[in-house]
Image (spheres, helix red, strand yellow):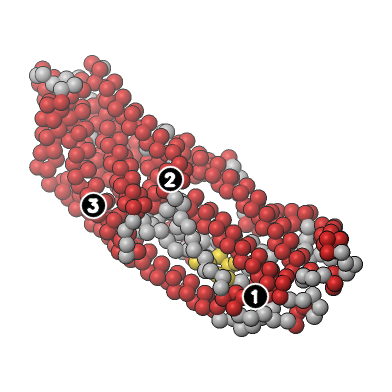
Amino acid sequence: MHLHLIRIVALHEIRTVFRSKMPFILYSILLAMLLLAGFVGWNYVSKFNAQQARYTTEVQDNWMNQPERHPHRVAHYGYLVFREKAPLSFFDFGLDSYVGNSIFLEAHRQNTVNMSEAGFSNGMLRFGELSMALVLQLLVPLFIIFLGFATVAGLKQNGVLKILLCQKASYLDILAGKTAGLVAVTWLLFLPLILTALIGGAVLLQNEINAELLLRSALILFVYAIYFLIITMIVTSVSAMSKNASNALILLILGWMVCFIVIPKSAQTLGSSLYKAPDKIAFEQAIEAQVRKEGDSHDPDDPHFAALRASTLKKYGVDSVHKLQVNYGAMVMQEGERITSGIFGTQFNKLIKTYKAQNAVSVILGFFDPYLPLRNISMQLCGVDFDTFSEFQKQTEQYRFDKTTLINQIHLTQISYQNDRAQKVAQSNWQQMPPFKFRPVPLTATIYNAKWSLIALLFWLAAGAAALGYISSQRKFQL
């Protein structure tokens, strides 16, 4: 390879692109779509988070202003938790529209997240939403195809390729230069826009900037740069193998349809077929059946709680629960809470494993389609992926369990067993309980979860380079 010749070819390709009006027309359309998608996404996330914050404040105020009550009534009063969108979710919507936005937390019952946007929308949502990530992932490759389908095939048609090969430049120099020129144009037109949108939009949403946000933005910029390079190498390779520009364009459009429509839809269908997930009713019935088997606190004849009663009486050295120093009813409720929470956690983890197995299908197919690994990584870095949603469910359940435990402790120590229901405790007992605060998935965990998608993207990068090298070595592709 001769770097100075590659540079000459690349600069010539850049000048050729910018001399034509068509690339500017296409870019203007994409730019308008990106700006529109960015503004709509940012405006929606901004209003959504403001609404969620307002509801959260209202729920907290209602909780704090409860009158003096029996602790068990406080436990069943419940607490509504709202899920705010991540700062970078305006860039990539991911799964946000398909997963719930709120969850009602109460004693003795584990609820799942409800009120998803998809549940209130019509069928048009199935066709996707216009986001910046969608435009960059699906439409920019089309832009690269229209820029580069004739980049080498056109030289074959007009005979210029033979003239270039008679000079000092090798076929590999020409292919590398064409690829460098096309990717330089793509990077110049789109990467600054991505970086400005990510940092500017996130700062406007949360009025601050931190190291993790900068790192996530930098990683998003990096993976999109790699993605554009991969697409450019594929376009150059197909153009180099084609006898004329028309054949190259047809092959590239067919490849775009397969990689961006057929395979992604097939991955989703195949994953659901291979790994069946129970519906909500079946999931809840499985939990109830397991609770009845292990110990039902509402059944006075349950063997588990009969054993608990006997061991408690023996521990305190009394012959009746009325003589205990603590409230036995609260003890029963806490034990029931421990059982139901443990069973829910076990069943929920099984459900999560099933969904992850379904998602693994798209990760595997990412080695056959460069769009899939980028889509997965983009969602994970923007905090709109399945791992973030499942972490929200887990954290809310832990918060519910801890809060119920504190209330049961108040019941245990401040309410006597005699005439239990007629007693009340002061407001200060629950006013000191902290509100729920979601802890997002750390960046290190996000990168670990995305490791196979990252490997798939790097595989495509290496495969693209290898393809250019192989094509340049074959005499039949030079004619």
- Element class at badge 2: helix
Q: At label 1, which amino acid type do we have?
A: Val
The residue at which mark 2 appears reads as 444
Q: At label 3, which amino acid type do we have?
A: Leu
The residue located at (59%, 59%) in the rendering is 398
The residue located at (77%, 70%) in the rendering is 326
* Image-based side of 249 in relation to 349, left or right: left
From the top left corner, tell me how far across and down residue 414 is, in percent.
Answer: 71, 75
**The C terminus lies in which quarter of the figure?**
top left
* Image-based side of 477 in relation to 80, left or right: left
Q: At label 2, which amino acid type do we have?
A: Thr
* Image-based side of 94 in relation to 299, left or right: left
The residue at which mark 1 appears reads as 74
The residue at which mark 3 appears reads as 193
From the top left corner, tell me how far across and down residue 412 is, in percent.
Answer: 73, 70
- Reply above or below: 437 against 220: below
- Reply above or below: 338 against 145: below
The residue located at (55%, 47%) in the rendering is 355
